[in-house]
Image (cartoon, rainbow, N blue to C red):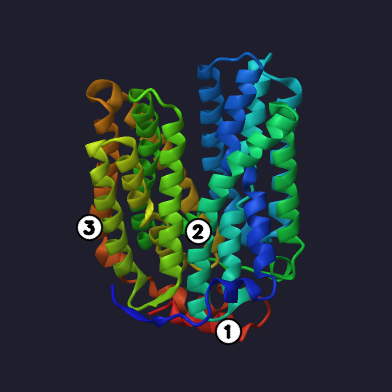
Amino acid sequence: MATEAPARGGYLDILRAPHAARLLAGTLVGRLPNAVGPVALTLFVRDQGGSYTLAGGLIAAYGVATALGQPLLGRAVDLKGQPRVQLPAAVLSALGAALLALTGIGHLGLAYAAVVLAGLFTPPLEGGLRALWPSVLGREDRVHRAYALDAVAQEVMFTVGPLLLTLLIAMWSPAAALVAVNALGVLGALAVVLSEPSRTWRSAPREAHWLGALRSPGLLALLGSFFFVGLALGSITVAAVAYADDRGAPAVYGWLMAALGLGALLGGVAYGARQWAGAPERRLRVLVLLLAVCYLPLVLVPGPAAMTGLSVLSGVFLAPALACAFLVVDRHAPRGTVTEAFSWLVTTFGVGSALGSAAAGPAVELAGTASGFAVAGAGGLVAFVVLLATARVLDAPKAPDAPAAKARHTVGADAPAAAHAEKNTP
């Protein structure tokens, strides 16, 4: 994984580009409801006198609905444009959350319907932003750094989001915080869709095919791998709770999660500070292998101080692996399906994370806390094996996409964006 000279500029170079800071900030705020959704639902249900079982059921319904909605809405964005899909979806999702806040958990059918509505219409802002970067930034090296910045920003959002939610609850109530967070989400989506790049972006013409983005073998291989990366991350969440319980110190869980986020933040900053040589598919295999190797020491379950250090290490290659995966999605997405393709990555990662959490629970109960962390190591290794087994299709982005790549991300006749797309096609 050789490197070239440091990339010109840096993250500040990205943020100084016209519209870039607004798009990134709007996307992060717009995704806030999804980032804090499980925590917000748990606190709301408990405040209403409901059980953890009910909270878990509502969170599961929300997660499944989100997983179903993301690729469908992503396909709609590719067909209809961003403003006509993103903003209405954000409003409907917020209405679902408001319905839950107003009606409570007294009528379970209505409560489940509300969270399904909120999840199903979660706007695909994440995929939409990645579809916009080439037309906003032009040069390929800047787009690569933007993907790394995107991965870093996610770690910041998932750290700051719960803190903001806690502050809102302290000021008002869990119900009011639920409404406020979703109102902020609508404002974030509004900031994105009113921007010129979002309003003028058009996807390339697409071949009519019921599979959409999933007809790409390379994309399927990537999704198969990142399902297991998500599984690994989800299992760590549950195993960290068990670790904290073993030591009778619930606060340790927060430290471990913060340490993992810090590691991802540091890794993402370092990764985005350089311009990397070679095909991203080959680089991704190395990054996922390193990610898996850094998960393995967690099974040692040492004391809290050492475990916090291992948690930092376990996060170091997460953001770089995600940033590199974004490049691979861009190279393998069939013509006219880029937003849908990115949304499938979000969905697959989320489903894997949920199943990882489900798998780690029985593992901890049957064989102890170390076995929960072993699930993470196993998930990372399987993710690497999938990339290794599918190297042939991953290393050869489909040739039929090449003629259309120039139009995939363009705003008008943007020459730099077209140049980026050409470089993305071997």
Question: Disc 3 marks which residue?
Answer: 389
Question: Disc 2 marks which residue?
Answer: 152
Q: Position of residue 152 (x, y in %)?
A: 50, 58
Residue drawn at (40%, 53%), measured in percent from left and top? 263
What element does badge 2 sit on? helix
Circle 1 residues within 10 Å: few <14, some 14–19, many ≥20: some
Q: At label 2, which amino acid type do we have?
A: Val
Determine the residue located farthest toward the front in the rendered image. Answer: 305
Q: Position of residue 401 (x, y in %)?
A: 45, 73
Q: Is residue 12 visible?
A: yes
In this rendering, the label closer to the viewer, 2 or 1 = 2
Q: Quadrant of the C terminus?
A: bottom left
Question: Disc 1 marks which residue?
Answer: 416
Please, is residue 145 above or below residue 225 in the view? below
Q: Which of the marked residues, 3 or 1, is nearer the chain's N terminus?
A: 3
Residue drawn at (68%, 57%), measured in percent from left and top? 26
Please, is residue 205 above or below residue 167 in the view? below
Q: At label 1, which amino acid type do we have?
A: Pro
Circle 2 residues within 10 Å: few <14, some 14–19, many ≥20: many
